[in-house]
Amino acid sequence: MSSIKAVSSSIAAVLGITALQAGATTFTPPAPVQFDGHYYQVVIANKISWEAAKAAAEQRSFQGVQGHLATIGSPAEDVFLHQLRQQVLNAPHPSLSGSELWAGGFQVPCATTTPEPACGWMWLNGDSIAPSNGPSPYTNWLNGEPNNQKRKADSLNRATEDFLAIGLNGAFGWNDEGALPNVWGYIVEYGEGEVTVPASTCTFDEGGCNPTGAQIFTLPPTAELAPGATLTARVTTIHDDPSRCGNQPLTLFNGAVVIPPYLCGHPDFIVIETHTQGVEVSSGAIEVENLTAQALPNNLFGCDAVRQNPAGQFDPDPSHRDVVAWQAQDPQEMLETSRGTGRFFGTVTEVTYACGSSRGKVLSGSYHFVGLRIHPGPGNELADGNPAGNHQSFIDLTRYKLDLLRASVDEAKVKGGLPKLDHLALRVLLDLAIKTHERGNYKLAALNIQLFLKAVEHVRYQEVAGENFNGEHLMRGSNIEFIYEEKILPFD
């Protein structure tokens, strides 16, 4: 019970619920409360239908993340939502019509071989809901539920309890509900909500798509789309710990993502996990534009030397810049996974190539990051009085990135993606860039990277199943060019 008490105390602290408020006569709507990387919010709306609650939840946003009716995937999350409901009830509030809140579960039409009330239950994210209680998938139906009690049968004699609510008569557990007077509101979840759009809306000709509100995603003209192709995006907001930045990696999603120490939230960042169906990108790179100012308005930095917060303030530190970062769905596909050490240990790479809003080139089926910046390491920010250390941090980062690009070019040859002479042409330019970089001639190194990018446009890449070496070389090369032009040469 100690963990439940801790959850209850943290909710109360965020909501500002104190004994002093007990005699209050005005109602302050509760703010979103964080739990396990997501935010949740109880909305009072007497006798609202599930369909209306779903639409209203999806019109809400918090920190740039679109809302949706809450889905419940674990006992801890279930306990948290029950406690959140209780805390709202314990605070001053308007009169309520019933005892229950809508969540994001519903019942689809059932086959005759599996009749009501058991069949067809699922969450809005597509996960199924078992009709009986169990640990995996987690379910917590109240005793005797779902029972599909008939409130008003339709012409086909179908019952109407087709939606999932929590808190029947104040109890901890789930109920299939259809009587609106029993419902006094709904729970919105911000984070890890899935949004699916037609991939045809994300093409270059259409100007890209923005399913999450945080990043414009544009497929290259070379993308091939099957009929009915889709893009699905799932969003999570993370609050970064400043003491981690420059010192320690950050591991997310059970080890699927490792943010290296050199990438840091300022202070929040958004992870967008994307999946495509029926989309093939075998050459060219996907363009992304991070809308950090809109999605994370309280973050500190913009892409250039003008701060986002406070707005308009000039900040000369090149590490105080919003950047684009990316990771493949499988971290083992990232060169960073096996080659990054120290400050660069992790699975995620920074890929910014232009400013305005932060812009980057990425590959598909992946994790995208909005709201990160490059951390130069402890004591190396300009405010620390160490401009030489700040400058050297970007020189070291670029040297690391040059090694990764060279490894990618070599891998393309080994896997049959680059003929021998084309590989040689790219290697010569990269070797020259590395040699001049090590000699401190960063202007010449940048010129060799520019020549490398021109060569990438003309060499004869061969198709290799599951690979896009052309896109990877554009992604990594254009990022290195940008770092030279914006974060090394102006400070050299």
Image: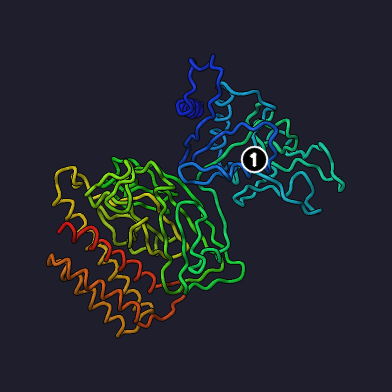
Residue pushed farthest bottom? Answer: 421
Colour scheme in the image? rainbow
140 and 90: which is toward the camera: 90
Residue at 76% x, 51% y: name it: 109
64 and 42: which is toward the camera: 64
Q: Quadrant of residue 469?
A: bottom left
User: Does residue 138 appear in the picture of this structure?
Assistant: yes
Left or right of 346 on screen, residue 364: right
Image vertical order of residue 153 relative to residue 183, above or below: below
Residue 86: percent from the left, percent from the top? 58, 26
Q: Quadrant of the C terminus?
A: bottom left
Residue pushed farthest front? Answer: 312
Residue 291: percent from the left, percent from the top? 42, 52
Residue at 32% x, 71% y: name it: 408
Residue 276: percent from the left, percent from the top? 53, 63
Number of numbered discs: 1
Q: What element does badge 1 sit on?
A: helix
Question: Label 1 belongs to which residue?
Answer: 53
User: Does residue 262 appear in the picture of this structure?
Assistant: no
Residue at 24% x, 47% y: name it: 315
Image vertical order of residue 199 relative to residue 456, above or below: above
Q: Quadrant of residue 41?
A: top right
489 and 16: which is toward the camera: 489
Residue type beneath disc 1: Ala
Residue 405: percent from the left, percent from the top? 29, 69
Left or right of 241 on screen, residue 342: left
Left or right of 450 on screen, residue 41: right
Residue at 65% x, 28% y: name it: 171
